[in-house]
Image: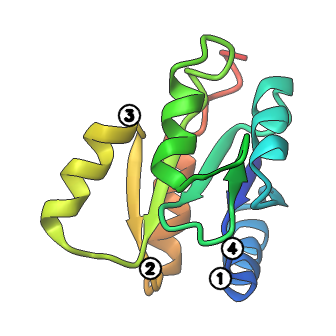
Amino acid sequence: MKTVLIVEDDLINARVFSKILSKRGGLGVKHTENVEEVIKIAQSGEADLILMDVSLSRSVYQGKSVDGIKITQMLKSDPKTANLPVILVTAHAMEGDRENFLKQSGADGYISKPVVDHQQFVDQILALLPTDGQS
């Protein structure tokens, strides 16, 4: 079973995403907003895809406040985690931001919240999950 790591500081959002992914997508789900834990899970291969909230209000790494863009940059610049798909999640559905966020972070995709179309949400995630042929 594939596992999605939800990096999100809003527990209600995290719960909604978890439910959609496990019920509709048949996926395993982990949740944390702790940056060290995110990196550990990514490096250990325990997640097949990361849903990364852009605006993490409480996440700190090595004493500095970091957002989802910064964490994605860290993951993408590390050869161990560079191939792990990351989908940014943001409430700022402003079109201009979208390209900037993707460019800046190197993320693989983008979802705006609130998620209205649950099936589309699941499909977008399933489309980016590595197939079993490649580990």
C-alpha span from label 1 to label 3: 23 Å
| Residue 102 screen position, x and y as percent | 31, 45
Name the element at disc 2.
loop
Labels 1 and 3 touching (C-beta < 8 A): no
* Contact between labelled residues 1 and 2, with CB atoms less than 8 Å apart: yes
Residues under numbered marks 3 and 4 in contact, where contact means CB atoms less than 8 Å apart: no
Residue 124: image location, x then y, percent: 46, 56
Q: Quadrant of residue 62?
A: top right
Q: Nearer the viewer, residue 32 or 65?
A: 65
Q: Mark 3 highlights which residue?
A: 106
The amino acid beneath tag 3 is Gly
Q: Nearer the viewer, mark 3 or mark 2?
A: 3
Amino acid type, mark 2: Lys
- Mark 2 or mark 4, earlier in chain: 4
Q: Secondary structure at mark 4?
A: loop
> Mark 1 — residue?
13
Between the C-alphas of marks 2 and 1, the distance is 9 Å
Q: Give residue 9's mark.
A: 4
Q: Is 82 on the left or on the right of 54, as rendered?
A: right
Sequence-wise, the earlier of marks 3 and 2 is 3
Q: Can the viewer see residue 32?
A: yes
